[in-house]
């Protein structure tokens, strides 16, 4: 009788705890946003595909309405997240450091310190594409006054690639636009070269390969070393398997990308976003295959932005250490 009574009491207690836990879970959502937007970049680039797919994953799994939004890319995303115009976004470490220091070209003197890191995305290679018929097979082949598309104004590519090419002695006519639009202009002969800074494979390049013959131009060892000495980038090899055009790996340089959020977003919301993203890499790779590097081991590549407290909680619960100077 005593054992039966104990079982009844234990069952009652367990049921009460489940009810309490359920109520607690519901209350945790009381300050969650009703909807959210992810700042991406122009259509035809990896940011748009990755960011829109990630937004859909969050919306589907967490039951919060949300989606991706076309933006000017990393620099503008820092400003949009800082001001609260979008909740989440994607950025690159170079523009992030400039924005945090108040050196963003969009708002000089404004320290964008309401932006927190969530998790690593992938490295952005800097790569160059020209039509095969142009005769441009190397950076040194780019003629004086060549019309070069650098992506959306104030994007990572537009911020860094012109300076890189100037350092390498290239004289050019600068053009801006979305990646898909620039791909069309290249094919139509309206520009001569596109200087991409985007996760690979770049949708616009893959589309060009289907429609025409292109040259994907690599850096020489000397050019790569010059750029490494003058800019916040790392060595990178574009795998030959990335594009049909490549017969062997192509030498390049790269910069890391991270997802970001407003630092004032609820901790419990960002905890669930981080948990979902870091514990389902197979689904992240379904969004874009560059997400193969969207794993917690790569948090070390953020040395710039503080991590959101919700992200910090997930990392520390799972054995990953966040430096004290990157906590709020």
Image (cartoon, helix red, strand yellow):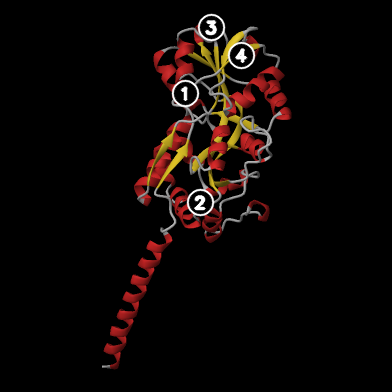
Q: Which residue is drawn at the image coordinates 26% and 88% (left, top)?
A: 4
CB atoms of marks 1 and 3 within 8 Å: no
Asked whether the residues under the numbered discs 2 and 3 touch, taking CB atoms below 8 Å apart as contact, a structural biologist would say no
Q: CA distance from mark 2 to mark 1?
A: 39 Å
Provide the secondary structure element on which disc 1 rests.
Answer: loop
**Mark 2 or mark 3, whichever is nearer to me:** 2
Q: Earlier in the sequence, mark 1 or mark 4?
A: 4
Residue wearing tag 1: 243
Q: Residue at x 51, y 25 (%)?
A: 240
User: From what the image shows, is residue 260 above or below residue 23?
Assistant: above
Q: Secondary structure at mark 2?
A: loop
Residue topped by disc 2: 265
45 sits left or right of 256 in the view: left
For label 3, the residue is 134
Crowd rating for badge 4 (residues with CA inside 10 Å; few <14, some 14–19, many 20+): some
Indicate whether 251 appears above or below 122: above
Question: Looking at the figure, which quarter contains the N terminus?
Answer: bottom left
Secondary structure beneath dot 3 equals helix
Q: Is residue 235 left or right of residue 15?
A: right
Crowding at dot 3, Cα within 10 Å, few <14 / some 14-19 / many 20+, comes out as some
Q: Residue 101: x, y in percent?
A: 69, 39
Out of 300 and 100, give the one closest to the viewer. Answer: 100
Of the image marks 2 and 1, the number of the one nearer the N terminus: 1
In the image, taking residue 291 as reference, residue 110 lies left or right, namely: right
* Mark-to-mark CA distance, 2 and 4: 46 Å
| 66 is higher (above) or lower (below) than 173 | below
Q: Position of residue 273 (x, y in %)?
A: 45, 50
- The disc placed on residue 138 is 4
Marks 2 and 1: CB-CB under 8 Å?
no
- Whether 106 is drawn above or below 275: the answer is above
Foreground disc of the pair 2, 4: 2
Q: Who is closer to the viewer here, 248 or 14?
A: 14
């Amino acid at each position: 009788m005593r054992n039966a009574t104990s079982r009844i009491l234990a069952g009652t207690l367990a049921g009460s705890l489940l009810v309490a836990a359920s109520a607690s879970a519901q209350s945790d959502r009381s300050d969650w946003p009703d909807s959210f937007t992810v700042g991406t970049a122009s259509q035809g680039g990896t940011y748009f595909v990755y960011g829109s797919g990630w937004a859909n994953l969050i919306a589907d799994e967490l039951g919060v309405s949300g989606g991706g939004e076309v933006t000017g890319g990393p620099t503008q995303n820092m400003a949009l997240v800082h001001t609260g115009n979008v909740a989440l976004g994607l950025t690159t470490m170079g523009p992030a450091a400039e924005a945090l220091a108040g050196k963003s070209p969009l708002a000089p003197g404004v320290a964008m310190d309401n932006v927190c890191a969530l998790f690593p995305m992938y490295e952005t290679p800097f790569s160059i594409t020209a039509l095969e018929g142009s005769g441009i097979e190397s950076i040194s082949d780019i003629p004086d006054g060549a019309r070069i598309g650098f992506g959306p104004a104030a994007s990572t590519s537009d911020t860094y690639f012109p300076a890189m090419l100037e350092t390498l002695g290239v004289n050019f006519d600068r053009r801006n636009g979305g990646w898909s639009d620039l791909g069309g202009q290249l094919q139509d002969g309206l520009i001569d070269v596109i200087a991409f800074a985007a996760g690979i494979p770049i949708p616009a390049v893959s589309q060009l390969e289907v429609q025409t013959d292109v040259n994907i131009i690599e850096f020489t060892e000397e050019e790569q070393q010059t750029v490494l000495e003058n800019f916040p980038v790392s060595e990178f090899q574009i795998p030959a398997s990335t594009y049909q055009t490549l017969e062997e790996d192509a030498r390049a340089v790269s910069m890391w990308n991270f997802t970001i959020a407003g630092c004032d977003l609820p901790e419990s919301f960002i905890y669930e976003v981080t948990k979902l993203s870091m514990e389902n890499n197979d689904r992240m790779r379904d969004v874009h295959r560059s997400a193969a590097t969207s794993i917690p081991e790569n948090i070390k590549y953020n040395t710039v932005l503080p991590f959101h407290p919700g992200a910090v909680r997930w990392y520390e619960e799972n054995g990953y250490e966040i430096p004290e100077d990157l906590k709020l």
